[in-house]
Image: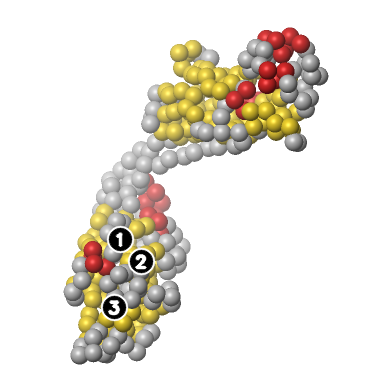
Amino acid sequence: MNMPHRLRWRNYHSIMKNKLFIAVVTFISIAFFYSQKLSAQVTSESNSSWIELTSYTGSTTYNAFRFSINLSGKNINYPNWSLVVRANPPITNPEGKIFDPTKISIRINQVTGGPTLADLGANQTPIPLSFNDKHIINRSSFPLRNGPEEYYKKYTFDFDVLIEGGSYLENLKTWSQYILSLTFSVLGANDKSITQSSPQVFMQIYPTGTPPSEPTYGIQVNSNARNGLLEFKTITDYVNGVSQTYQNGLSVTSNTGYAVQVRSLKTNFEAGTHILPVSAVSLEIKDPNNSAVGGTISLSGNDQTVFNATNSGTQPRLFNLRYFTQPNDERMLNAKPASYETTLVYTLAPQ
């Protein structure tokens, strides 16, 4: 029989917070017109309408932006072209408040001038804005083209703007206007810019009513359980298995139903070149005040739900963590003496 050895692992904990988003009132007045010519034959122009956001539940402003591509000249041909959009930083106001571009989405709703959106292969789902280019049309199979007897064409695109709701808007509430600047760019098959245009709008964030309450989630492995340890010291340990319990080792906060999931970052405990499968160790999580709440799993490299529970309100709920091995496990009997480690990830999944 091998000499006694230690089986050790480190617990990793993470805290996850979710927020229920609330819409804010945003007023966008009629903004600037901008036109830029980067090609002798292909130019673009754009303008904007105004956007009003009056509810914490969010808003949709139809036809908030318009972008046009102008073809001037004969025998123009740009196959596999793309249309991209980006927000220009910062989205801010004179008070220095900054609006997160990902809370604002743009959606193409129509094109005039010949082709349909389907012909162009346009993405008609809302696209969260970014300070990097996002594709609205990606390498269209419908070319930008004028024939030998044509001289002028114009394709005009209209866009809706959707602002995400959420109580985050409360911190942005002000009568001082924000400036949102977008850049629409037409790219050739080589992804080089053919033409671009940058409209701007004023936004005013002033929600009315009371911000909704938001879900609160948190999970934490407490300090007494951050470094779990199982020790095999005697023959009895191998015969009966070993167990270690950490009282109140896990803290969970949730005001909705939830599941607790656990996975190992590795499929094996490791000690240099020596390994043991993580499934050799089992985990039990129990509510010390309610034995009906909890569950047991064998560790794995995949996420496993240990148990589901109803909400705990806004106060943390404490659970005992117990790690243990099975009696007469040949994997332990044949393991080389060493200190084996892995890292566990605990996750709270709202239900």
**Which is more toward the observer, 258 or 27?**
258
Mark 1 is surrounded, within 10 Å at the Cα level, by few (under 14), some (14 to 19) or many (20 or more) other residues, namely: some
Q: Give whichever of discs 1 and 3 has the lower sequence position.
A: 1
**Which disc, if any, is residue 138?**
2
Q: Residue at x 52, y 33 (%)?
A: 302
Up-down: is 307 above or below 194?
above
Q: Residue at x 36, y 80 (%)?
A: 195
**In the visual, does 335 lie left or right of 136?**
right
Which residue position is annotated with label 1? 123
Which residue position is annotated with label 3? 144
Contact? badges 1 and 3 (CB < 8 Å): no
| Tag 1: amino acid | Asn
Q: Residue at x 56, y 23 (%)?
A: 298
| Tag 3: amino acid | Leu
Viewer can see residue 321: no
Viewer can see residue 136: yes
Q: What is the secondary structure assignment of the residue under circle 3?
A: strand
Q: Quadrant of residue 50?
A: bottom left
User: For the residues marked 1 and 2, what is the alpha-carbon distance in whole angstroms?
Assistant: 8 Å
**In the visual, does 93 lie left or right of 209?**
right
Up-down: is 147 above or below 161?
below
Q: Give whichever of discs 2 and 3 has the lower sequence position.
A: 2
Q: Quadrant of residue 157?
A: bottom left
| Tag 2: amino acid | Asn
